[in-house]
Structure formats: structure tokens, C-alpha cells
Image (cartoon, rainbow, N blue to C red):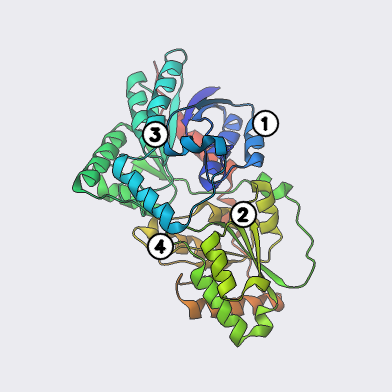
Amino acid sequence: MFKVLVISYYFPPMGLSGVQRVLKFVKYMRGNNWEPTVITTGSTGYFAHDPVLFSEAEKLNLRVIRTEAFDPLSILSKYKTIRMPREFIRKFLSRISKTFFIPDNKIHWSNKAYKVASDLMSKEKFDIIFVSIPPFSTFSIAAKISQKFDVSLFVDYRDLWTNNQFAFNPTFYHTYKHKKLEYRALKVADKIIAVNRRIKESLLSTFKFLTFEDVVIIPHGYDVEDIDTAVVEPKLNSKMRLTYSGMFYESITPKYFLQAFKQLTIERPDIAENIELHFIGYLRKENQKLVKKLGLIPYVKDHGYLDHSSTITKLLSSDVLWYMLGKSKSVDSITPGKMFEYFGTKKPILACVPDGIAKVASQEYGASYITEPDNVEEIKNALIKIHNDYRDKKLPQPNDEYVTRHRKDIQTEQLTKLFQFYLRVI
């Protein structure tokens, strides 16, 4: 088998969607004649830990090298799962971190990973280096390793670096330094993987030396085994179950949706009483207070954070799924990983999104009700339409070909075929 060194800070037992992309890639690499070795973080605090994803990783019998190093969350490692602070505190701490750490606060871990990878590669041969970003500091050290050992480098852009939607550059120097670091790393990379077309377009327009062929799009996807093995819960009533899975942060907020539902309870209580709103993940204290303030407690079921298997069960047991993206800088480059897991369930979706790649994906899925993210009246009318379609058994069906295209086993086959073209003969 060929050998690939995978460098990814986010990996089980951590949870959330950034972890799943890398886990599912390495899961299916062996079936395509590639043996992965993963360098990842050791024990550290994080907002979510997922025993099911960890068990899945363990069962793969992969070589996983866990590397301890300082980062702000490592201080809290003994606490394992960290309670997410209120949004204004989280944003403040994020800005402090981005002021003092360039390119990110994982730079110490990345430097330690560089030493570990160098020791490993001095003893054995690897055919490809694959790094998934963010954190962006891992791209810089992967580029150094690639040059040092003359091994082809693949970088996987889950989000933009220089033009990231959540970037905070307090000085011109920060902007200059980020772009310079990214430029240097991209000069070394042999192939760039982007999760959507807008990220590809941004990279090509920002770094003129890149060609169209340098960047390949492999979107987020879903694991068909997760869907096929999940157990669907029996419904205890005839109410329409509408579910959201994930976190709320920055401009991703349930505020407008909840306000729309409040209007629905006033104008069409007959419809509101036939809908259950389920939240999986971190609804967060400020949003729980909003639910109470709007008088929506009877309609809302807050499940808290669930492991991945339980989340899939809840999604498959729902009638309609909901997600949103707020209006923010570079929001048109965001395609949340959970959106494609929603697609894998083949459930109808309420997508409250601005113009951009997420809206395009929702349209191509073919079973979406689409509104602006902050138009309360439009969201309320969409809820009425969805309920009536549910009542009349006329909920839309997705485009099966589009759904199949996002299976992780198929995407991993595509990725490993690209690996083959960049093997270097030594």
C-alpha cells in the first residue's frame, strides 16, 4: 500500500463537523490502497467530545500519533469538555487570541507536530502529506516538511485563510503576515482541495500564480454507513418535527427563526401547535433565554450535545431539517459540513441563507425551502408552506444523483486517485 501522512489538529475524541471530514477520509483510504498515519493533538479541552467518533477511529486500527503541546485550550485539558461561554465573551477572547497569535493559537502545537513528523519521516518513507486547515499554522509546517523530505503536499481548505469570514486583523501587519504565510505555503503545495467553488475562486483571485487545475473541489459529504446503520425513533404524535443540529456563534443565530415562529403562534396557532422544534448541539444560554422570553418553551425540545450516532438518529427521525447562515463577510464561501449530512438523510430542508454557495447547494439538493436568514416574515411564511406540505403529504424529494455525489467513500476514492498523480520517484 502507498502511505499518506495526515496532519490534522481536529480528530476524535473531539467532536463537531471539522473532525468528521478528516476521519471519514482516513476511514476509506485503505480501501483505495492508501495507508494513513495521523498526527493530531493529545489531551486538550474542547467544546465537544464524541465517544462514538472516537470509537469509530479506534476500530479502524490506524496509527494515530497524539502530540502534546501548549495552546490556550490545553490549559483546560483536565476539564475535557469546555462549556461554551456567552457569545460576546467568546468573540472577545477570539479577538485577543488573533491579536497575539499569528496565524492562530495552534502555532505551538503545529511546531511540535513538525518535530514529530520530521522524526517519523526520517525513519520511514511516505508518499503524500495531507493537511486539513484550519488551523492554518499546520499548513505552514506541512509545507516545511514537504520541502525537507521532497514529498508531495496536499492541502484541504475547509475554510478560507486570508479572506476568512471570521478573520480579525487589528493592524496592517497582521493582514500582511497572514497573506505572506499563506503565499509561502501555497507555493509549496502540489494540490489544493477546496470544499466549494467560492473558496476556489477566492484562492485563484488572491494568489495569481495558481492555475485553475491547481485547485480541485471535493465538497463536504456524508458517510452512507452512518445513515444505513442508524435506528429511527418511532414518533409518539402526529406533530411535524423540525430539527436543527449544530452550534450558534457569530452571525449564525436562531433569533430570526424564533421570532418568526413566535409570529406563527400569534397568527396561526393551529399550525404552531402542530410543530415541534428540536435543537441538537449547543443552543446556548442566551438563546435559551430568548426561547423563554418569546414564550416558546412548550414548542422547543433542547437535546444538548449528542454523540454523532445519536444525532443521525434524531435527524432521520425528523420530518424537516433547518439550518441558517447569517450575513457576514465572505459568507458566500461557507458550506457547513452539517448541511451535507442533512442531504444524506434525504429529508426536506428549510435553508435560511443569503446569496452564496450554500444557497446554490440547497437549490441543487432539490428538496429545500429557501429564505433570507433575517427576514422574519419570509421565514414565517415558509413555515406555513412547509407545514401545509407536510399535512398534505407533499413534502419535496431530493435529487438522488446530487445526494449520491456527496458520499464520503466516493469522495475518498476521488482524493486518492489524485494522490496517484503526485507520487515522486526517489
Q: What x and y, as percent, mark residue 159?
A: 40, 48
* Residue located 31% across and 37% down the image: 186
Q: Amino acid at mark 2?
A: Gly
Q: Which residue is mark 3?
A: 138
Binning the other alpha carbons within 10 Å of mark 2 as few (below 14), some (14 to 19) or many (20 upward) gives many
Binning the other alpha carbons within 10 Å of mark 4 as few (below 14), some (14 to 19) or many (20 upward) gives some
Instruction: Check disc 3 and report its element: helix, strand or loop.
Output: helix
**Front-lying residue, 51 or 28:** 51
Q: Amino acid at mark 4?
A: Gly
Q: Which residue is mark 4?
A: 356
Q: Amino acid at mark 1?
A: Lys
Q: Amino acid at mark 3?
A: Thr
Q: Residue furthest top?
A: 123
Left or right of 389? Residue 234 is right
Q: Nearer the viewer, mark 3 or mark 2?
A: 3
Quarter that holds the C terminus: top left
The Cα atoms of the two marked residues, 2 and 1, are separated by 23 Å
Which comes sooner in the sequence, label 2 or label 1?
1
Left or right of 411? Residue 279 is right
* Residue located 24% across and 40% down the image: 177
Q: Residue furthest bottom?
A: 267
Q: Are marks 4 and 2 in contact (CB under 8 Å)?
A: no
Q: Which residue is mark 2?
A: 344
Q: Nearer the viewer, mark 1 or mark 4?
A: 1
**Front-lying residue, 282 or 21:** 282
Quarter that holds the N terminus: top right
Asked if residue 4 is positioned above or below residue 361 in the image, the reply reads: above
Q: Nearer the viewer, mark 2 or mark 1?
A: 1
Q: Which residue is mark 1?
A: 59
